[in-house]
Amino acid sequence: MEKLIKETRRDGVRMILVISPAYGVLEQKFKSEYAPAFSLCHKYDVPIMDNSINRLFMGKDELFQDKTHLNHDGAILFSQIMASQIKNHIKEQHSILCGL
């Protein structure tokens, strides 16, 4: 992952780490598995959009294929949410850079 961050940065690509929604409350073990990724994102100032505990998805059978994978409807909803989150992030960054 560190190599990917360095290479994308070298190529002028801005990266965002996205964590998909989970069906239920994540166990501490699962969260700890993301610790190295969180650490690298912090080190290289890569934004993180953690949707793992997004209440719009948790426990909603109609949005999941199984306990870890969204189905078609869930993927469409998540894509819409991610588009909005990324758009807001870009607007915020633009405002900061332009001093607005």
Image (cartoon, rainbow, N blue to C red):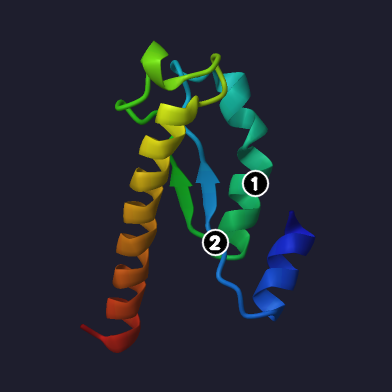
> Against 72, is 41 above or below?
below
Residue count near mark 1 (Cα–Cα under 10 Å), binned few <14, some 14–19, many ≥20? some
Quadrant of the image for the C terminus? bottom left
In the rendered structure, the answer to whether residue 57 lies left or right of residue 100 reads: right
> Against 85, is 72 above or below?
above
Q: Tell me which amino acid carries mark 2.
A: Val
* Residue ID at (37%, 20%): 58
Q: Quadrant of residue 94?
A: bottom left
* Residue ID at (38%, 15%): 62
* Label 1 element class: helix
| Proximity of marks 1 and 2: CB atoms separated by less than 8 Å | no
Q: Which residue is mark 1?
A: 37
> Against 92, is 20 above or below?
above
Q: Is residue 70 visible?
A: yes
* Residue ID at (50%, 26%): 70
Give the residue at the far left of this rendering.
100
* Residue ID at (36%, 24%): 57
In the rendered structure, the answer to whether residue 50 lies left or right of residue 87 reads: right
Quadrant of the image for the N terminus? bottom right
In the rendered structure, the answer to whether residue 21 lies left or right of residue 56 reads: right
Mark linked to residue 96? none
Label 1, label 2: how far apart the Cα atoms are:
10 Å
Q: Position of residue 32 (x, y in %)?
A: 62, 30
Q: Which residue is mark 2?
A: 46
Q: Quadrant of residue 55?
A: top left
Q: Nearer the viewer, residue 20 or 28?
A: 20
Residue count near mark 2 (Cα–Cα under 10 Å), binned few <14, some 14–19, many ≥20? some
